[in-house]
Each structure stands twice: as C-alpha cells, then as structure tokens.
Amino acid sequence: MPADDDTLVAAARNGDRAAVERLLRTHYDRIHAVCRRITGNDADADDAAQEALLSIARGLQRFDGRSSFATWVYRIATNASLDELRRRRRRPLLDGVDEHDHDSRRSELDRRADPSPAAGGDGVAEQLADRMLLGAALGELAEEFRVAVVLRDVADLDYAEIAAVLAVPVGTVKSRIARGRAHLAAALHDTASEPARNQSGPGTRQTTAAESTPLT
C-alpha cells in the first residue's frame, strides 16, 4: 500500500477534494487493469472502472480501516466489474456477438495488423497476440476462477486479502486460483502447441503465451 494512503484517506474524509482526486489517480491504473481482465474488453472495463471510482469517492466515509485501503478498493472494483458483466448479459446481442467485445477485439486486431513503427514493430505485434490469447483464455474461465486469478496476478493481493474481497475462506481462494491457473495453462498450451509444432524443428522449445505474457 502506498505510504501516504492513510494520510490521504484521513484528509479526504475531512472534505479535502484534492486528497480524493489523488487517491483515485494513484489507484486508477490497477483498478482499470482488474476491471479489464474481469470484464474481458475495454468498453466494459471503462464503465466498470468509472463506476468503481464513483463508489470509492462516495464511500470513503464508510471505509473503516479494518482492511487496507487497496483491499477495499479492489473489492469495489471487483463488484463493479461483476455488475457490468451482469448488465452485459442482459443486453441484446448483435448476430450472437457482444457489441463491446466485438469492437474491442477488432481494435486490437487492427493494432496488431498495423503496429506503430515507434513501438517496436513485430515484437509489439507478437506481444499483443499473446495478450489476446491470454485475454481469450481468461474469458473462458468460470467467473469465480477468473476473479480469483485476476486479484492475485493483476492486483497482486495475497490470499488473505482476496478472501476479504470475495468474502470466502482462504482455502477456497487457494483452490480457485490453482484451478484457474491450471485451466489457463491448459488452454494456452492447446492454442500454442499446433503453431509451435508447425514452426519448430526437432529439439526446439517454443515459449508459450502463458510464460511470456503478464496478465496486466
């Protein structure tokens, strides 16, 4: 937790708007990363992150300090993401494809096809492809596994903190993370194994997306 979170929270609860804004700026990137990995696309992540920021700002007076501020923030971000998923399931589909998900995948494909010259060319395209594979694999996970893995590997919370966020026992958290990671590894291995066999000579080992790509 940043060293000045407690000071900023105290100031914010006393009506210091600058302290509120600094808290939100400090935690926004990680909040959005959590929302992105739980919801699976940029548009829904943007909506969930904005809803989380509003809830944090409005709820500061109710923050009792029994957990760290970061844990409290990620609980709000997780709930906002799950609410967004529920809203998405209620939205009508266009030709069987969620419109936001379609737009997000298309924009990522466009960037992959035409990477910025200043960004490193082929290397950036390969990293983006790996991230897309990882995002797709995460999207296939059961919600309970996906959320636990994201909170551990994106938010970097420990098991006790994740248990507090999800209101489940630590043993359940460990089980969900282990099962989620196992499903991810299997999905990414299956996706990567066929191209690797086609492109590799005898004795050549290919690096998989699971090994080379962070969740953030």
Image (tube, rainbow, N blue to C red):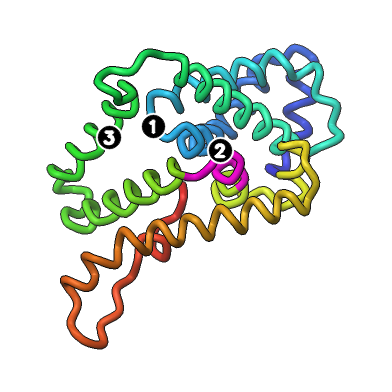
Is 60 positioned to the left or the right of 190 in the image? right
Q: Is residue 142 magenta?
A: yes
Q: Are marks 3 and 2 in contact (CB under 8 Å)?
A: no
Given this view, does label 3 or label 2 mark the residue nearer the observer? 2
Residue that carries the numbered disc 2 in the rendered image:
143
Residue 41 numbered tag: 1
The amino acid sitting under disc 2 is: Glu
- Mark 3 and mark 1 lie on one chain; the one further toward the N terminus is 1
To which quarter of the image does residue 106 belong?
top left
Label 3 – label 1 distance at C-alpha: 8 Å
Which image quarter holds the N terminus?
Answer: top right
Q: Residue at x 47, y 32 (%)?
A: 39
Quarter occupied by residue 12? top right
Q: Tag 2 or tag 3, which sits nearer the N-term?
A: 3
- Percent x, y of residue 169: 80, 46
Disc 2 secondary structure class: helix
Look at the image and give the residue range highlighted in magenta. Answer: 141-148
Q: Is residue 132 left or right of residue 52?
A: left
Which residue type does callout 1 highlight?
Asn
Q: Looking at numbered disc 3 in the image, what kind of residue is underneath it?
A: Arg
**Label located before the other in sequence (1 or 2):** 1
Mark 3 residue element: helix
Farthest bottom residue? 203
Provide the residue designation for mark 3: 105
User: At numbered mark 1, what does the secondary structure look like: helix, strand or loop?
Assistant: loop
Q: Percent position (x, y) of residue 47?
A: 47, 19
Camera-side residue of 190 and 45? 190
Residue farthest toward the front in the current orientation of the protein? 96
